[in-house]
Amino acid sequence: MRYLTAGESHGPRLTAILEGVPAGLSLTAEDINFDLKRRQGGYGRGGRMKIESDQVEITSGVRHGKTTGAPITLHVINKDHQKWLDIMAVEDVEDKVKLKRRIKHPRPGHADLVGGMKYRFDDLRNSLERSSARETTMRVAVGAVAKRILAELDIEIANHVVVFGGKEIVIPDGLTVSQIRDLAAQSEVSIVNQEREKEIKAYIDQIKKDGDTIGGVVETVVGGVPAGLGSYVQWDRKLDGRLAQAVVSINAFKGVEFGVGFQAGHLKGSQVMDEILWSEEEGYTRRTNNLGGFEGGMTNGQTLVIRGVMKPIPTLYKPLMSVDMDTHEPYKATVERSDPTALPAAGVVMESVVATVLATEILEKFSSDNMEELKAAVGSHRDFVKRF
């Protein structure tokens, strides 16, 4: 399975083409719209979310509610484009229009300046438009299709915020994936410890009042993943490596860890490794899950625990200093729109890219021309692993 996305933040529409989805998967626009709405939610979101109400249009690859095995084309209209018709016009325009909303004061932490250097732009809007987090709309749309595949295979996925701008959220022990999903869904800040809700909202309000932004850490958990996905035989076939690349590719994400992650650097081997157990009912299991469901670049049958760290949004309403491209004189950076935080939305994006990588790996490993074959192949593999 593979996909491409296209479109700009203020362009007419965003598009994704997804190829390799098995035939016979039940899929509707509402399956995708549900996650698109989740991406636009969460406490602390700003003006763009009030403008857009993302709805997908499926224009190929699905007939009568079932995928056909052909490429699936997804479109999301940018309603805000109507205010940018001349600025974002495809055809050439007059010089006075080109100067309108020209970006020449690059924002620290964004792709503006380096993108201009790489592609030789004299208007950094060209960098801004494509590098915008608006692009993640289509990664969420693709991820929603991937999640439909996983659901048919009894694989469940959830995300929640575990660190909010330095404030760590204590997670109750023993929560299942479905419990994490349900608790986080009840929270406007996507946390499972609802006693902290009021405190976190007040913190976000203060950050917004200060004209600043905060980042944090998001956790995605995946249950029901069969053992043996990924491989140790080549560096680029290690599944945790593929997932790490996908997570860090999300706008503003700067790091990823599995299980105890970086904490392992402070512990002894006896405190980290997951002892192996066996029972007639479950087959092989682990006493703990410190490695986050991975051994040797492969899934080991335990719940996947993946954390991504998101830096604070770099666009500030009290802008940082920059340089005027024309004069090279000091100047305050350009301000577009900004939110004090987008952690709950970022969690939806992370959940989506994790689902996409996992679905892709499953479709590579098992016979997958149609869903009937895929479910039979995965079921057979699970039986074999349990008897091993």
Image (spheres, rainbow, N blue to C red):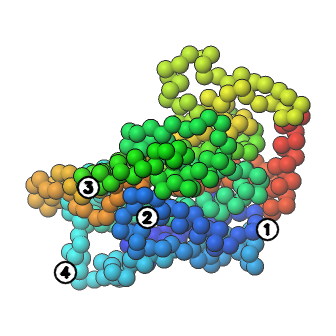
Q: Which mark is residue 117?
A: none
Residue tagged 2: 134
Sort mark 4 into few (<14), some (14-19) or many (20+) by Cα contacts within 10 Å.
few
Q: Amino acid at mark 2?
A: Arg
Question: Gap in Å between the C-alphas at discs 1 and 4?
Answer: 53 Å
Residue 382 drawn above or below residue 97: above
Circle 2 SS class: helix
- In percent of width and height, residue 349 lies at 52, 55
Residue tagged 1: 24
Question: Gap in Å between the C-alphas at discs 2 and 3?
Answer: 24 Å
Circle 4 SS class: helix
Q: Are discs 2 and 3 less than 8 Å apart at CB?
A: no
Q: Nearer the viewer, mark 1 or mark 4?
A: 1
Disc tally is 4
Q: Which mark is residue 209?
A: 3
Residue tagged 4: 96
Q: Earlier in the sequence, mark 1 or mark 4?
A: 1
